[in-house]
């Protein structure tokens, strides 16, 4: 469904990603594992169209989407739920959700999408009229995920969904992600909580210094010595 | 091994660059006097006097607007003060030569009073505040009629001769204007090439990094404003004598302020000679338009100015000097290339490790809340001499917040940080400046290079903390750069470095301060394996020279091999501390990093 | 007492005048995060357009709004697209300031070139007729400005809160990166916002032209006060700008009457400097947005 081939990308003169190739098949849950600064976020931002790759191609559902901008990627059905929630703090939760269905295609079914999303996130329903900035970190993360789903994306990308959350909330966030996965969504997820994500994912890539050094099924990665040493600390 | 191959082409290139600039500069300056003298036409004299006056005003403005990056659109205040003081005193029988200094003194006073509260404001807001002050001065000049003559303005008394700065001939006027221009250029050049100039540019580029390097950011900017105001007032006094008539609308004019700044931008903001270039090119446009087209051209030169300004901003934001240096840099880079081949790695000293000594820093019961969030909860630890203390924990655990509190960037809600000074006494520093003075140096997680400065200049800003002389500081900066493996890039602009290079630069700048305590915030994040190994060696060599280190680090390999002790922070609390090997086995730590399920799964 | 009421009324009328000029400025400020130093010159352009349309075509000044507002919208949109947008990523905010300062200088002098230094008087068309309302006198044109400024504020607020485009504009202001992720074309939103802000000035200019003589320097006169209003009301706050404008109008009017008409500006700018230095978030903003101030 999504295929990156030999992607190079970075900010200004600095190249962060070197020759990244990866694929995500429909219905799969794929994770990218790596240390801080390895280029995980840059990979997701490149796929989302926020960064133009300097070389390589990205194809989505068989079409070349390498040069598309972020709003065109949203139209294609790719949504990124960014690191640190990134809600619109002075808007109500409902307004935040509606922004998730901003594109013309999504606007038509925004009411239906809202109902679907709220049935997945009953806690969000209780907060609809509150300002997003007044919510707790865990609630904000739920709203961010719900907002991402408003466009009914074909591919949902998560960037560090557990960042800065208390352990108990982290578990809840992962429960939600698992529920979404069960609905058949295709998911690409980046997490520092390596163990949690590998448990939830089908396959994983290990990213070090902007290069993919390992690619395997989650189970194999969980038992890989390098992964265990570098990321699980054992 | 690298000394000869790196420095000789570089200094040669530098002297080439210097020659390339010096000859045209001398030619421009000489022609400012020679052309009118040779042509001998009154109008040509007038144009060149005006060029000198505006070039001087613009050069003086550039000390604040360019070097310090404080975009003042109120510089006409100081110009007006100089003009009014000169004329008022002259009417009382006092020579403008004395009036000049009186005007400068008043202007300095006004500048300091105006600027001090405004330094908190950034960019457009600083500009707006200066415009507002200018309006206030203009209205007050209109209001105090007895003193200023109000809207009718003031004439100078008809007294001619050198002692009154008023002449029938144009030549003496040109010489005075030229002298003032030389004076401002000399002052600007002196500032830019001495410590204060480095400090001003560093403050402009990254205020927090400048603070960490021990720069008194407010003090240096006040000094810059004072010097700039005095020079502007000098020119104001002379210009009033030249014009023989002054009025509030012309003296305290926003258009005037904008023009002064405009010449500097078009010539090259923050360069010593850019404003001169801007004035030389643009002043004749307005004067010729006025002379040839008269009333028909009302607004023509202003229109041209505005359009030129927009075009410059869009297509050559570094001004004319930017174009010139792009040309000279191409020549220089050939010299640098020779150096890159001989790139040196960081060379660890082969010295023996000194034993861990007595406490040098004590942190007790730190508490910090942001809004309702308890980001630091009763954090306390001690750091001993020659020790490396690792500070680890998941993202968002509050590590950087602790760093900010033990370097003066954040005030703890409660708790204390005490540091043992070089003389053995215990002190409680509070500001970043205090911490720098007592010997605490820090890096930033998000690198904070002074982007527009070269690698050498970046490190010099740190070196100035101990060495006020430019050459000494340069020497220390070069040594430090060699040690950090940055030698080949001394002349490169910091913005061109890779992430790994920037991280090393960040450390180099702090090392040049010769700190006794070093706080390193994730210096290894995002650099490649070779660089990590190099960084580990480097930190060992720093430690062996007796420096105590606190390091926030995510790269486990580094934490394990470097740290004598490790502190684990989670949700703002210390959850474990001790030997690195012990700590990583601690179930509490494993849970914090990996989650409870991991423990369950392992069990 | 009657004098007091008269001064009070004058202050409110002046306040509504400042409000209608400042609304567009604060919108651009708040959303695009650019200080448009040429805002006053947009007003001047609008006033000259009104003057030309009324004198050459003989239409009522207020009717020219159907041409002036779109023209100003275009001017704003073009400014954003070709002058500001290329500079949005400049790490140095000097560059943006100089860009709009350059535009302002060019427009002022262009007006001088075209219309000369003489003032241009738009026909009063009955708008300078004094009305006697109990003890106070005011002009019908002033009442029009008061009504229009309230209407503009209300319409803008409704637009921003009720429409999807309006919400997108707010979203861009609150979190640009997230807005991009929602598929909002941020550059287009900036162009639209700049255009709307400038169109508001267009509305202001048709209202002001019949009451004030038009000259190349008129923009500077109004815009400095508009900046004061915007800072006072809190950057980007439309309601705040209205309240700030009323306060400045009243200060101006009372200072002019009780201190001396030539010192009005000192009072106004004095307040401005105090606010800027002591409470830079403005008087009415609940949330701190202090990106322009060091901690």
Image: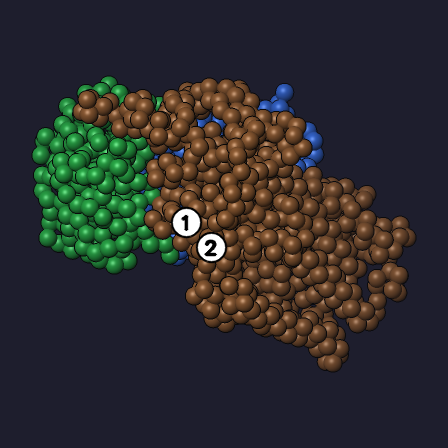
Chain colours: A green, B brown, C blue
Horizontal relation, residue A11 to residue A120: left or right: right
Nearer the observer, A136 or A98: A136
**Which residue does the image show at 32% across and 33% down from the upper left?**
A84
**Which residue does the image show at 82% across and 48% down from the upper left?**
B102
Are the residues at dot 1 and dot 2 in contact (C-beta closer than 8 Å)?
yes
Horizontal relation, residue B493 to residue A159: left or right: right
Nearer the observer, C239 or B5: B5
Chain that bears disc 2: B
**Which residue does the image show at 58% across and 67% down from the upper left?**
B11
Nearer the observer, C280 or B542: B542
Chain that bears disc 1: B
Measured Cα–Cα span from mark 1 to mark 2: 9 Å
Q: Position of residue A115 (x, y in %)?
A: 15, 26
Q: Say which element carries label 2.
A: loop
Looking at the rendered structure, whether the residues under marks 1 and 2 are on a common chain is answered as yes
On the question of residue C219 being in view, the answer is: no
- Reply above or below: C195 against A86: below
Q: Position of residue B290 (x, y in %)?
A: 63, 68
Q: Residue furthest bottom?
A: B38
Question: Where the C terminus of chain A falls, by quadrant?
Answer: top left
The tag on residue B485 is: 2
């Amino acid at each position: 469904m999504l295929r990156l081939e030999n992607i190079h990308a970075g900010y200004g003169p600095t190249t962060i990603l070197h020759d990244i190739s990866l694929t995500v098949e429909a219905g799969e849950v794929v994770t990218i594992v790596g240390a801080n600064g390895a280029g995980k976020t840059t990979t997701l931002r490149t796929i989302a169209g926020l960064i133009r790759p300097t070389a390589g191609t990205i194809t989505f559902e068989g079409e070349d989407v390498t040069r598309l901008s972020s709003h065109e990627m949203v139209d294609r059905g790719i949504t990124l739920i960014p690191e640190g929630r990134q809600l619109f703090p002075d808007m109500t939760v409902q307004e935040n959700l509606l922004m998730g269905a901003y594109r013309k295609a999504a606007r038509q079914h925004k009411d239906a999408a809202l109902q679907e999303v709220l049935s997945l996130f009953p806690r969000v329903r209780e907060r609809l009229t509150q300002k997003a900035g007044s919510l707790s970190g865990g609630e904000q993360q739920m709203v961010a995920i719900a907002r991402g789903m408003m466009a009914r994306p074909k591919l949902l990308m998560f960037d560090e969904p557990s960042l800065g959350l208390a352990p108990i909330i982290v578990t809840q966030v992962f429960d939600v992600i698992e529920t979404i996965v069960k609905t058949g969504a295709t998911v690409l997820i980046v997490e520092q909580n390596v163990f949690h994500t590998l448990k939830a994912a089908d396959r994983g890539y290990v990213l070090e210094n902007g290069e993919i050094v390992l690619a395997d099924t989650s189970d194999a990665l969980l038992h890989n010595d390098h992964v265990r040493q570098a990321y699980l600390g054992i | 091994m690298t000394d000869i191959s790196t420095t000789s082409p570089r200094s040669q290139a530098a002297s080439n660059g210097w020659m390339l600039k010096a000859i045209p500069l001398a030619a421009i300056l000489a022609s400012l006097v020679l052309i009118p003298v040779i042509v001998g036409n009154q109008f040509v004299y007038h144009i060149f006097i005006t060029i000198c006056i505006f070039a001087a005003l613009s050069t003086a403005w550039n000390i604040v607007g360019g070097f310090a990056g404080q975009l003042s659109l109120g510089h006409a205040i100081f110009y007006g003060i100089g003009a009014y003081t000169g004329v008022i005193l002259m009417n009382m029988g006092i020579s403008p030569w004395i009036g000049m200094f009186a005007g400068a003194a008043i202007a300095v006073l006004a500048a300091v009073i105006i600027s001090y509260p405004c330094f908190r404001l950034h960019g457009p807001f600083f500009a707006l505040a200066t415009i507002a002050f200018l309006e206030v001065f203009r209205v007050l000049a209109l209001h105090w009629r007895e003193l200023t003559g109000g809207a009718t303005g003031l004439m100078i008394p008809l007294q001619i001769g050198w002692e009154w700065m008023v002449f029938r001939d144009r030549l003496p006027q040109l010489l005075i204007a030229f002298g003032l221009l030389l004076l401002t250029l000399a002052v600007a050049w002196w500032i830019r090439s001495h410590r204060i100039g480095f400090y001003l540019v560093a403050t402009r580029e990254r205020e927090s990094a400048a603070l960490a390097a021990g720069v008194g950011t407010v003090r240096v900017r006040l000094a810059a404003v004072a010097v700039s105001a005095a020079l502007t007032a000098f020119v104001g006094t002379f210009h009033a004598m030249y014009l023989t008539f002054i009025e509030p609308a012309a003296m305290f004019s926003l258009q005037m302020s904008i023009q002064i700044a405009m010449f500097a931008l078009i010539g090259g903001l923050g360069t010593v000679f850019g404003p001169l270039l801007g004035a030389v090119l643009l002043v004749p446009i307005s004067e010729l338009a006025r002379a040839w087209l008269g009333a028909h051209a009302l607004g023509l030169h202003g229109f041209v100015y505005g359009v030129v300004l927009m075009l410059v901003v869009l297509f050559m934001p570094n001004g004319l000097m930017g174009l010139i240096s792009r040309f000279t840099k191409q020549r220089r880079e050939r010299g640098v290339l020779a150096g890159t081949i001989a790139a040196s790695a960081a060379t660890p000293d082969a010295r023996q490790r000194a034993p861990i000594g007595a406490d040098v820093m004590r942190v007790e019961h730190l508490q910090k809340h942001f809004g309702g969030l308890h980001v630091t909860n009763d954090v306390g630890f001690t750091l001993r001499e020659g020790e490396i203390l690792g500070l680890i924990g998941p993202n968002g655990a509050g590590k950087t917040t602790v760093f900010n509190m033990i370097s003066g960037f954040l005030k703890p809600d409660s708790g204390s940080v005490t540091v043992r000074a070089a003389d053995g006494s215990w002190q409680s520093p509070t500001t970043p400046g205090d911490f720098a003075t007592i010997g605490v140096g820090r890096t930033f997680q998000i690198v904070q290079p002074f982007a527009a400065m070269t690698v050498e200049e970046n490190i010099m800003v740190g070196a100035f903390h101990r060495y006020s002389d430019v050459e000494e500081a340069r020497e220390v900066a070069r040594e430090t750069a060699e040690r950090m493996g940055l030698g080949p890039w001394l002349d490169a602009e910091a913005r061109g470095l890779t992430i790994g290079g920037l991280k090393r630069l960040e450390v180099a700048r702090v090392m040049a301060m010769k700190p006794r305590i070093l706080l390193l915030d994730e210096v290894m994040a995002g650099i490649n394996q070779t660089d990590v190994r190099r960084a580990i060696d480097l930190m060992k060599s720093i430690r062996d020279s007796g420096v105590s280190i606190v390091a926030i680090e995510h790269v486990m390999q580094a934490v394990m091999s470097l740290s004598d002790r490790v502190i684990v922070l989670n949700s703002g609390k210390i959850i474990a501390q001790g030997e690195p090997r012990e700590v990583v086995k601690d179930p509490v730590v494993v849970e914090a990093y990996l989650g409870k399920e991991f423990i369950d799964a392992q069990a | 007492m009657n004098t007091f009421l008269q001064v009070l009324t004058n202050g409110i009328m002046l306040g509504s005048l400042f409000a209608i000029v400042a609304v567009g400025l604060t919108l651009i400020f708040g959303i695009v995060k650019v200080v448009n130093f040429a805002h006053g010159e947009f007003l001047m352009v609008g006033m000259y357009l009104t003057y030309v349309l009324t004198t050459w075509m003989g239409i009522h000044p207020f009717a020219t709004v159907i041409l002036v507002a779109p023209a100003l919208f275009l001017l704003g949109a073009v400014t954003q697209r070709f002058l500001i947008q290329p500079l949005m990523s400049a790490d140095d905010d000097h560059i943006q300031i100089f860009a709009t300062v350059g535009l302002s200088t060019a427009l002022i002098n262009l007006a001088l070139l075209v219309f000369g230094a003489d003032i241009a008087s738009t026909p009063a068309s009955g708008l300078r007729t004094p009305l006697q309302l109990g003890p106070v006198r005011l002009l019908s044109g002033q009442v029009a400005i008061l009504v229009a400024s309230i209407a503009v504020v209300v319409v803008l607020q409704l637009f921003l809160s009720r429409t999807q485009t309006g919400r997108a504009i707010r979203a861009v202001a609150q979190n640009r990166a997230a807005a991009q992720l929602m598929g909002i074309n941020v550059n287009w939103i900036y162009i639209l916002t700049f255009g709307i802000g400038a169109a508001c000035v267009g509305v202001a200019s048709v209202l002001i032209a019949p009451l004030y003589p038009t000259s190349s320097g008129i923009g500077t006169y109004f815009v400095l006060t508009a900046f004061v209003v915007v800072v006072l009301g809190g950057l980007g706050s439309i309601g705040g700008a209205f309240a700030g404008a009323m306060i400045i109008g009243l200060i101006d009017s009372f200072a002019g009457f009780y201190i001396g008409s030539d010192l009005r500006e000192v009072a106004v700018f004095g307040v401005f400097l105090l606010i800027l230095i002591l409470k830079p978030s403005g008087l009415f903003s609940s949330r701190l947005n202090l990106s322009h101030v060091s901690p």
